[in-house]
Amino acid sequence: MRRFAFPILLSLLAAGAAHAQPVNVPVLVPLTGFLSLEGTSQRNGALLALKQAPAGLTVAADVVDTGTSPEAAVTALERAAGKPVTAVVASMLGTQMLAMLPLAKDYGLPLVTVSGTASITEQGNPWVFRFFPGDAVTKAAHARYVVEDLGRKRPAVIYQTTAYGQGGKAQLMEQFQKLGATPVFEEGVDTSAKDLLPVITKALAANPDVLVLHLHSAPTALFIRQAAAHGVGVPIVAGSAMHQPSTAALLEPAELKGVCAETAASPVSGGSPEVEAFTAAYRGAFNAEPDAFALAQYDGVRMVLDAAAKGARTAEQVRDALAKGTHKGLAMTYASDGKGNMAHSAVIVCYDGKTRVPALVKRYDSLTGAVK
Amino acid sequence: MRSVLASGAVALIAYALLYASPYGLRVLTVAGVYALAATGFQLVFGLAGALSLAHGAFFGVGAYATGILGSQLGWSFPATFPVSLALPVLLALLVGLPVLRLESHYFALATLGIAQVVLLLAVNTPDLTGGANGLAGVPGIAAFGATLPRGLPLAAAVWAIVALGGLLAWRLARGRWGRALTLLRDDPLAAAALGLDVGRLRLQAFALSALYAGAAGALAVHTQRVVSPEVLEFPVMVSILTIAVVGGRGRVAGAVLGALLLIHLPEWFRFLERSYLILYGGALLAAIVLAPHGLTGLLERLLPPKPRPPPAPLPLPAPAVADGPVLRVEGLAKAFGGVRAVDGVSFTLQSSRITGLIGPNGSGKTTVINLLSGLERPDAGRVDLLGRDLSGARADRIARAGIARTFQSAGLPEDSTVLEAVAAARLERDASIATAEAHALSVLARLGVADRARERCGTLPAGLRRRVELARALARQPRVLLLDEPAAGLTDAEKAELSGHLRAIAADGVAVLVVEHDMGFLLPLADRVLALDQGRVLYDGAPAGVPHDPAVVEAYLGAPA
């Protein structure tokens, strides 16, 4: 019931507002399929930001499930474009983003996303804005933590055979090469794999000094559980999927002991009164734990709303504000690198084995070098 | 029914021209893409009855051909589209030869395996396909320097191709080829025994379906402007299968109606966020329960088509026949594992003579008929029809050479009319369906069942089914007619009538071999009797000698009490 109430609630909030033209931000995200958990975080972050819109703004938001097919995403965007649109919260799935980009350019609609797929900002399309650090940023932090902080030089890289996995793996390999580390093992894992012990065994046979994961949520949890069950002593540094509370919920705290992960942010870990307030509001609104995707999407929509509050009314004005402005968000400070990459920071979180809430152990700012 | 479909088409065009928003036109365009894919699927699944789970892969191959050539090499539509048609067809021909031999569920699994291999190739060859991300920057439909804008022009282009493809498929489905596929779907053994090259027909349907899938994939990519592994994933296949089933299996109109409904349905419920899946599933379930034969079946039930007037009977030309031996069988042998079902059987069938084949159950009678008609391959021996060696030949070649047969349990397609069932025997000989039906009607008239021509085979009593099956075999104008227990289940009056017909058929110069257990029916009918036991000839002589032959009595008839 709550999800149907949101558009109505948002309209009521704005009742009596001075501006006649509403700020319309359709939310086109994957709510079903293999990215439903992350897509729901994206949706929730966007809706929370709209709920907390600056006073005086009339806001409206239709939420549409894009599933996981590019076709559904493009159709959803075409549907949304039937009304005046200020900006679009666009799917975090890279293949959907790539499909939506030409249409967004035709219609002149800013796409505000948290997709990590590197190539979406390499298409020369001025209408895309990514508020989640791209693979170039997060994998730079990932590799630097492994090499510079842990002092490991013989990583085993296990990645997913999806767009997310292949893109991240390519970035990891490049970063390791820059840092003088040579992976001793690399293998792709299908999302349908139900037993990762064979790949763990093969990886350990290569005698690595660290296991570097770049897997989706459920495979990450499965890998860590099986590694813990077999007493693997080699440290594990996982991808951003690990930081998600929904991933940690699949594991016992003891299984997480010593595991670290890269991410854009970890709102449940706190860090500032503003982030703690966000986390509390999120829990209150959705009865769920927020993750970095929710926070990044919240920050992205807040930047759109701030621009609108400062007078940007048309999609083109909002695009200009996003392209040229700077926004101090909760996770980091956002500014475009000229291609629409707004996020340039990443953090490392680690689990102590006693709780499922990780601690922030390292922050990397001003990371650059989006590489296709 | 046709007027309803025509009205629907006019309404659809009016909606597209006058009312549809850009969003509505996009959904309509996507529906067109799936209608085209499902039309192809109707050929292989609906008509030929082969559950090809590679159809989604062919869709994806067509999509990738256009995606790669368009985005990486800058080719335009006139060059990419033919490649998107040709590549899936080539793939279908390549894989079709081995997998089309498999039985239904093994065929489905094998084609699913093909789809998985193609998907893995797409994901794991990023230099060519863009890997899991796919390739962006696919151009729209462009030719001669002009690009078709999205919206109405793109929707019109896609639906024009759907109309062309649909018309071609409709004509094929209504013609001899479509009838042959339907027969093959309902009973592949009977189809082969009626002279149809089952393997060639299946391969043709498989390849043609791939052509449609490739075209649909190409149009999908022009619509989306990106190509990614999702076009090869199972949901595409499931969508096409669901469209075919909900629309009406084997019907072109079903593919179009199914696509329009199933592509629009989720959009109508999209405002419910993820809950739309529940309503979508419920609506699908309701459609299948309320219309088990699909939307076209429902329309036909509500608006039954007018029966076509029967064709004027066209007598079959009398073949030139000569007296004497027609079929020589020498040393025929067949073993199933350690069981020697037929063990060195030799005999000759004479023109205008009826030969009875008797023996206890398991003695090898039906196996002999199966060997003679090509449904089984002999281990040894020679079969010679009028000087032509048919040993080990395929069933359809044997049938075309002049041997026809009936089956122990009359294998008539339940949903076909009597006329359609008998006309099926003429498909590989006559130039058109009309001629085949006219010939079939003359054969039915000869056997006294012309008045039942428009009835469904499934509604006929056993006696009439036997006679219709005999008519189907006769419509082949055979030189040799093999009948497997033709009197089983008949009343005495029906048996007497059958005897009369068989004598008349033999009198026309046909060599008739009758497998029968009913000695009261067979012995007065036959000119000669062969008795088998354990695969060997026990007796070969006059019918009158059968009851007195000690070996036949011991092995088969038993001593009188």
Image: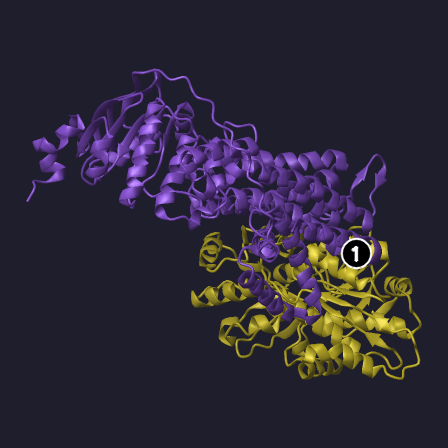
On the image, numbered disc 1 is attached to which residue? B15
Shown colour of chain A: yellow
Figure label count = 1
Residue visible at 50% across and 40% down in the picture: B420
Residue A259: horizontal and vertical position, in percent?
55, 68
Q: Which chain is purple?
A: B
Q: Is residue B323 above or below residue B546?
A: above
Residue B62: horizontal and vertical position, in percent?
65, 41
Q: Is residue A275 above or below residue B104?
A: below
Q: Secondary structure at mark 1?
A: helix
Res A71 → quadrant? bottom right
In the image, is B404 to the left or to the right of A190? left
Quarter of the rendering occupied by the C terminus of chain B? top left
Res B84 → quadrant? top right
- Asked whether A101 or B519 is in front, the reply is B519
Type of the residue with mark 1: Tyr
Q: Is residue B495 above or below residue A323?
A: above
Q: Is residue B485 among what the camera can see?
A: no
In the image, is B425 to the left or to the right of B10? left
Q: Chain of mark 1?
A: B
